[in-house]
Image (cartoon, grey):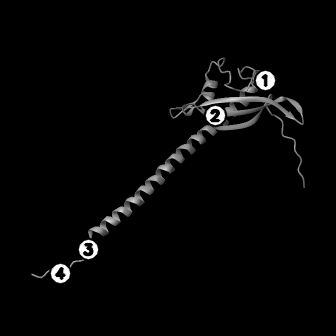
Amino acid sequence: MQFQEERGFSLVEVLVSVVILSIVSVSLISIFSQSLRSTRESSNETVAANLAFHAASYLQQEAIDDASPLKYATLQTLVDDGEVSPPCAADASNACQSVFEPVINGKPYSISIRLTDYTKDGVKEAHLIRSKIVVRDPQQNSAELVAIEGVISSAALNEEFPFTLSE
């Protein structure tokens, strides 16, 4: 019986390859965990941005409704009060509360508003209020997630916007 010389990997070669594989695996796990964290933060900011735009739209709709607890005259009383939660207590339908204190996927958010006078060239515009809507995360020490700014009007814009075309 004659043995053929078999050539294989030595123990040192196997150990070196296992160490290299381990280093690559740890690097990939680190990259994946970083990616997951970034995705979670991005998703949270996207939800916050959508909530802010929804709150802005809700405020504008309520401002032109004289029966609303957030009608334009009420909003004018909040001008220059700093960052406040909207007065939702008078809203029997709880729609206001669901807009400004929403819970999305089991996570609560807090939305506040800051209203200031709208001025153009130093003149106060009587039918406009400048607004800043801030979405905060109460679970992270009320960290500000998103803030948007806009203008609230006292009337619905039913007329066509006047514009000129330059040729």
Q: Position of residue 55 (x, y in %)?
A: 67, 32
List the residue tagged with mark 3: 8
Q: Amino acid at mark 1?
A: Gln
* Disc 3 to disc 4: CB gap under 8 Å: no
Say what secondary structure mark 1 lies in: helix
Label ID, residue 9 = none
- Please state which of the two labelled residues, at mark 2 or mark 3, is closer to the viewer: 3
Say what secondary structure mark 3 lies in: loop
- Please state which of the two labelled residues, at mark 1 or mark 3, is closer to the viewer: 3
Q: Quadrant of the N terminus?
A: bottom left
List the residue tagged with mark 2: 135
Q: Position of residue 127 (x, y in %)?
A: 83, 29
Give the Cα separation between the discs numbered 2 and 3.
Answer: 63 Å
Q: Position of residue 50 (x, y in %)?
A: 63, 38
Give the Cα separation between the discs numbered 4 and 1.
Answer: 96 Å
- Say which of 68 and 107 sits in front: 107
Residue at 72% of width from left, 33% of height from top?
Answer: 132
Task: Return the disc, 4 or 2, that comes first in the chain's sequence.
Answer: 4
Q: Amino acid at mark 3?
A: Gly
Give the Cα separation between the discs numbered 1 and 3.
Answer: 84 Å
Q: Residues within 10 Å of mark 3 (few under 14, many from 20)?
A: few
